[in-house]
Amino acid sequence: MSESGKMEGACVFCGKRATRGGMSRHLRSCAARKTAVAAADGGPGEPEPVIHLQVQNAHMDQFWLHLEMRGTAPLKKLDDYLRAIWLECCGHLSQFSRGGWGGDKIAMTRKAQEVLRPDTTLTHIYDFGTETVSQVKVVDVRTGKALSRHPITLMARNEMPAAACAECDQPGAYLCLECMYEGEAHPVLCKAHAESHPHEEYGDPMPLVNSPRSGECGYTGPAEPPY
């Protein structure tokens, strides 16, 4: 975490650490990324719009992603990616829209290049009961070839937020849902205290993972990039 309290992450191209906004600026000038883009542009395939996206949780801004998406890929591929890295627990419904809950719904079949244009921000909602809301912002669009054969490339993400155990000073690894739902100030526990902590109403504590979905519904991760 930076001195400002904002969560940092590492650039996958060069390893530089920065906050969400700092990473947006860094990726524009990263020499290692430019080298990767030049190598991709020299390979086979046709150029297309390639879109730099900044994704962040709407309510907990320590969770963020910087992605590149092929312009010819449908929005469903972005939905699949967000489910895999952040969201999927029970097969809930999801949607993209302009303007949030009451905004205009956008079909998942729409190609990214048709919707994700400079200065565009979309809302992504997963699960309309215990919803997780993300903001998808277009940072930049380049014309060239994608960095991999996949529709989306991860360029950076936030580090796992640190949390200390409520019972001791050890790093937290579990979330007590009973404490969280009952309004306790600090529901995080280390492994040892998770085993001995009383939790009668909501089952065993759930593992903490690098996702804004932690503690919601049946989410337990894996919160890892799908490719």
Image (spheres, grey):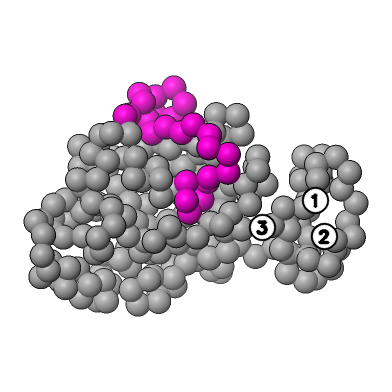
- In this rendering, the answer to whether 85 lies above or below 13 is above
Residue 194 numbered mark, or none? 2
The reply to whether callout 1 and callout 2 are in contact (CB within 8 Å) is: yes
Classify mark 1: residues with Cα within 10 Å, few (<14), some (14-19) or many (20+). Answer: some
Q: Position of residue 82 (x, y in %)?
A: 44, 48
Tell me which residue sits at (41%, 50%) in the image.
81
Disc 2 element:
helix
Residue 104 location, quadrant: top left
Q: Position of residue 72 (x, y in %)?
A: 19, 45
The reply to whether callout 3 and callout 1 are in contact (CB within 8 Å) is: no
Residue 204 numbered mark, or none? 1
88 in the magenta segment: yes
Segment colored magenta: 83-107
Tell me which residue sits at (73%, 58%) in the image.
174
Direction from residue 149 to residue 208 in the image, left or right: right
Instruction: For marks 3 and 1, give the CA distance.
Output: 13 Å
Mark nearer the N terminus (3 vs 2): 2
Disc 3 element:
loop
Direction from residue 163 to residue 9 in the image, left or right: left
Residue 62 shows in this picture: no
Residue kind at label 2, given as amino acid type: Ala
Residue position for label 3: 208
| Disc 3 versus disc 1: nearer the observer | 1
